[in-house]
Image (spheres, rainbow, N blue to C red):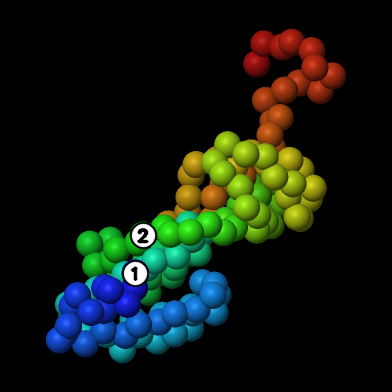
Amino acid sequence: MAAGWAEAVAPTPADLLTAATAAEVSASVRGAVAAARVGMRAAVAAPAGDALVLRGLLHEAGVEDDEMTVVPVGSGPVRIYCSHCRHTTVAVAAIGAVVPCAGCGLGLHVYYHVSRRSGHFLGFQEDAEKLPGGGGGTQ
Ligand SMILES: [Zn+2]
């Protein structure tokens, strides 16, 4: 897909950066954005978790939403930020799933909110609204 994008904009120069993970390509992306001139565009094709991380990286580097195209392809893990211990858990999970936090061990509900800065999903304790002992309550 990315090679097709580079061909589509020819003869406009395009840097094609490829890697197995967002972490592997992050430094190259930052360098390409730093060297870019007015009129640059960024396109990302990656599994959703890595695509969100790279989108956050581009945003942090100053790339505006209308200057980037992000297309999730394939499958892979996402990053879930624990609102209780602030650890980030990497797991293959869908929105609404429950995954154990790698930091504190709580079962985290994967909420649909995604940080624009980090690309991490918000996770919170799955049974946070249940009273201890399973009794009813009026909160
Ligand atoms: Zn945690």
Which residue is outermost to the left? 11
Look at the image and tell me in which quarter the C terminus lies: top right
Q: Position of residue 42 (x, y in %)?
A: 30, 72
Res 51 quadrant in image: bottom left
Residue at 78% x, 50% y: name it. 104
Residue 71: give its label. 2
13, 5: nearer the viewer: 5
Three-letter residue code for mark 2? Val
Residue shown at the point (76%, 21%) measured from the top left? 131
Can you say whether 122 is above or below 52 in the image?
above
**Whether label 2 touches label 1, CB < 8 Å:** yes
Res 9 → quadrant: bottom left
Q: Amino acid at mark 1?
A: Met
Q: Is residue 52 visible?
A: no
Q: Could you tell me residue 29's position as x and y percent?
A: 41, 80
Q: Horizontal placement of 82 versus 54: left or right?
A: right
